[in-house]
Amino acid sequence: MTRVAGIDCGTNSIRLLVADVHPETGELIELDRRMTIVRLGQGVDRTGRLAPEALERTFAACREYAAVIEELGAERIRFVATSASRDAENRDDFVRGVVGILGVEPEVITGDQEAEFSFTGATGELPGDDRRLVVDIGGGSTEFVVGVRHVEAARSVDIGCVRLTERHVRTDPPAADEIAAIRADVRAAMDLAAEKVPLGEAETLVGLAGSVTTVAAIALGLPEYDSTKVHHARISRAQVDEVVTRLLGSTHDERAAIPVIHSGRVDVIVAGAVVLAEIMERTGAAEVVVSEHDILDGIALSVA
């Protein structure tokens, strides 16, 4: 067994997984998994730069994670940075800060690399050999990946929940024209994805990341977030549509009162839920299989 640490730094959150990984079988034994909402991508779509306060929030989380990694004695660390740091003019500031805290340089990966990690992490423990379309709805981008046991095609497009919220939402609850603008962006982005990824040919739709898991927790009526109930839950298209309708009619305070919505997702969950609903509409999927395992697990496996 090799003890590894994988860090996934996205547009909205930064997450850590410390695990023991069997180098031959790929078996992963989780030791510590945690997530912090840092909103690294705050304003990036508008300014093209990482905000100083967003960098400081991210560095504070990195210091916390460094202590956990040292305590658990991880032998190898891999830090992967995704959409926000790909897009920012001042990403060198981000890189220097991470190196100073963790001693490892963040890899600002491409959308295709991000898709590969997401697919590996999400499908590794799913039974069967059906063709799967994995969708990873992030803060700045969404990855579409199709394959059976290996990736056959992938495309990353800029329709994350943070990006779409900052771009279009000005009222609370969002106005009809704001939601229409979000839907239009999602549909245009799916047209781009479809140039490379056959969106309607997979037998199973697998959904990843916080927007999907939060929608699932709401649909399941959980009194508090429980990853063991969310992981591999099957949520029907009708259930997703019901959650979207509920969120579209709710104010910020009403969403904040829903116990399964993390405080850092209250203002962006509407856009994330709409993205999921539009994907199910476009693909014709009757249900989505929700996975708690995603790019973070793929990162950890790649280290070993």
Image (tube, grey):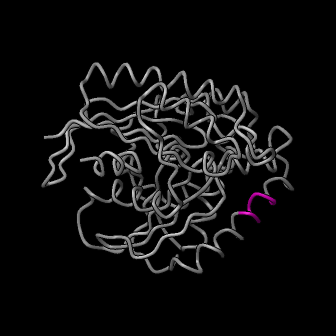
Which region of the structure is painted magenta?
180-185
- Main SS category, magenta section: helix
Quarter of the rendering containing residue 43? top right
Q: Which residue is drawn at 85% across and 48% down?
A: 175
The percent coordinates of residue 270 (x first, y second) are 68, 46
Residue 45 sits inside the magenta stretch: no
Q: Is residue 150 above or below residue 299?
A: below
Magenta residue check for 181: yes
> The N terminus appears in which quarter of the rendering?
top left
The front one of 2 and 274 is 2
Q: Is residue 32 above or below residue 7?
A: above
* 129 and 15: which is toward the camera: 15
* Residue drawn at (13%, 54%) of the image: 25
Please state if 92 lies on the left or on the right of 67 as rendered: right
Residue at image location 33% in from the left, 38% down from the top? 228
- On the image, the x and y values in percent for residue 97 come to 55, 29
What residue is drawn where x is 29% and y is 47%? Answer: 303
Q: Position of residue 139 (x, y in %)?
A: 61, 46
- x and y, in percent, of residue 74 in the image: 26, 30
